[in-house]
Amino acid sequence: MMGVSGADDDIVQIQHPNKTGDPFIVTVNCPDKTGLACDICSIILDFGLCIFKGDVSTDGVWCYVVLWVIPQSLLLPMNSSYLILKERLQGICPPCLASFYLVQQPSRSSPVYLLKFCCLDRKGLLHDVTKVLSELELTIQKVKVTTTPDGRVLDLFFVTDNRELLHTRKRQDETCERLNAVLRDSCISCELQLTGSEYEYNQGISSLSPALAEELFRCELSDNEVRSQALSPDMAKLKKTIVTLDNSLSPAHTLVQIRCADHKGLLYDIMRTLKDMNIKISYGRFSPNSMGYRELDIFIQQKEGKKILDLEKQSTLCSRLKLEMLHPLRVIIANRGPDTELLVANPVELSGKGRPRVFYDVTLALKTLGICVFSAEVGRHSTSEREWEVYRFLLDENCEFQLTGVAAKNKIVNKVRRTLMGC
């Protein structure tokens, strides 16, 4: 039975498994709010955990979420970092106060800091720095990376601190010390400061040509992309995504039934879609992976508490869910003059939040392939339908991986997509 917890510490509980390999059990029991399940899944994804199965239920006032999670790509051992996960989850839960039900206060945005450092270039540098920032729980908002002709790299990272401690000298010193430890003698300078007008100036992304934007943001994969993105035979599995709506099983709710191929962040993609469409979740069950597929049953209502009876709204919801499950991330290779550029894009939530760990996963894939990055940029791009987070990487021709030829470029796209999707 749902009810008020005795203390804020009881809002989030993490139960350790009895034996190695079994899932941890994460329980969140707190006042409800629109998009809470999405926010929880975002943190789980950011933490490098895979949701094995899950249950969500709410009476519109109180929410109860149970997730069975398995470490997939943790930056720190779960046994030593679960308290950090607990604090992160507690931070997004509404307070357990009676007055909360009357007025929900808007969440306060975290201040943005500019981390600027200069160092000598080397293979894998960008990912090594990204890994340190992730371990420190610093979220990358924007990036500008430039390589000079003399082999130096000037990096501008605009970051927020999940611990909300970056204003302290101790936290700033810790950040610079950790970076110096990984950069070693190659580090020339390292500065950290609260942002000013330079952050607003760097919000956008360098101009995309109309043809490039059309290719990157199109709703469906073309036949050429299906082949060149090298997801086959996975693509045949992805194409079998099924979404159905049923209004006959509940007098007050519409049942959404989903069967689709599994991928990293699947539950997050579904929950952020429902959140952005102002769909309320009353009950949901996320079944374990079976032969590479997942099945979900979700009882939902419209924002005003009614079933979805309008056929056009039903069609829109099904189409949107299929699109976000099949095509949650865009990855293409393009030519920028004589150079080769990798572009990755993901939708931004209406709340303004981007997808977790994208920059980390892309730089990991490039490091694994032995590809150096000459310059990198992260920013926002708005189309007529939505806002996107766009990652642009100008690849260095002088590396051990040969960038010329269709097969080589397809291999890069394949590796990046598979790393992002957890395939």
Image (spheres, rainbow, N blue to C red):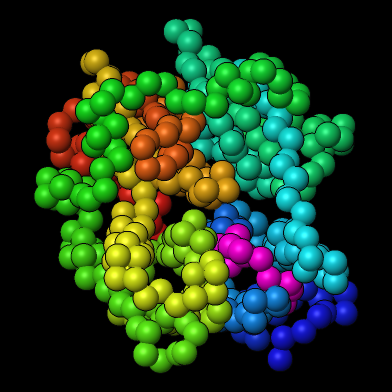
Q: Is residue 181 visible?
A: no
Question: In which quarter of the view is residue 241 placed?
Answer: bottom left
Q: Residue 197's x, y, as percent?
A: 67, 18
Q: Residue 56's x, y, as percent?
A: 57, 79
Please give left or right for residue 30 compared with residue 53 in the image.
Answer: right
Residue visible at 63% across and 18% down?
198
Please give left or right for residue 4 compared with residue 300 in the image.
Answer: right
Q: Is residue 13 visible?
A: yes
* Residue 36 part of the magenta segment: yes
Residue visible at 51% across and 49% down?
349
Front-most of 357 and 30?
Answer: 30
Residue visible at 87% across and 32% down?
169
User: Which segment did they paint magenta?
Assistant: 29-41
Locate the N terminus and report the quarter of the image it occupies.
bottom right
Question: In which quarter of the view is residue 293 placed?
Answer: bottom left
Front-most of 275 and 27?
Answer: 275
Q: Is residue 280 above or below residue 214?
A: below
Q: Residue 120's x, y, as percent?
A: 55, 18
Q: Residue 183's x, y, as percent?
A: 62, 29
* Residue 361 part of the magenta segment: no
Q: In the orientation shown, which residue stands out farthest toward the left?
A: 223
Residue visible at 23% across and 36% down?
215
Front-most of 218 and 179?
Answer: 218
Q: Is residue 31 above or below residue 379?
A: below
Locate the C terminus and report the quarter of the image it occupies.
bottom left
Label total for image: 0
Question: In which quarter of the view is residue 303 placed?
Answer: bottom right
Please give left or right for residue 303 compared with residue 32 in the image.
Answer: left
Q: Is residue 247 above or below residue 69?
A: below
Please give left or right for residue 230 compared with residue 420 in the image.
Answer: left
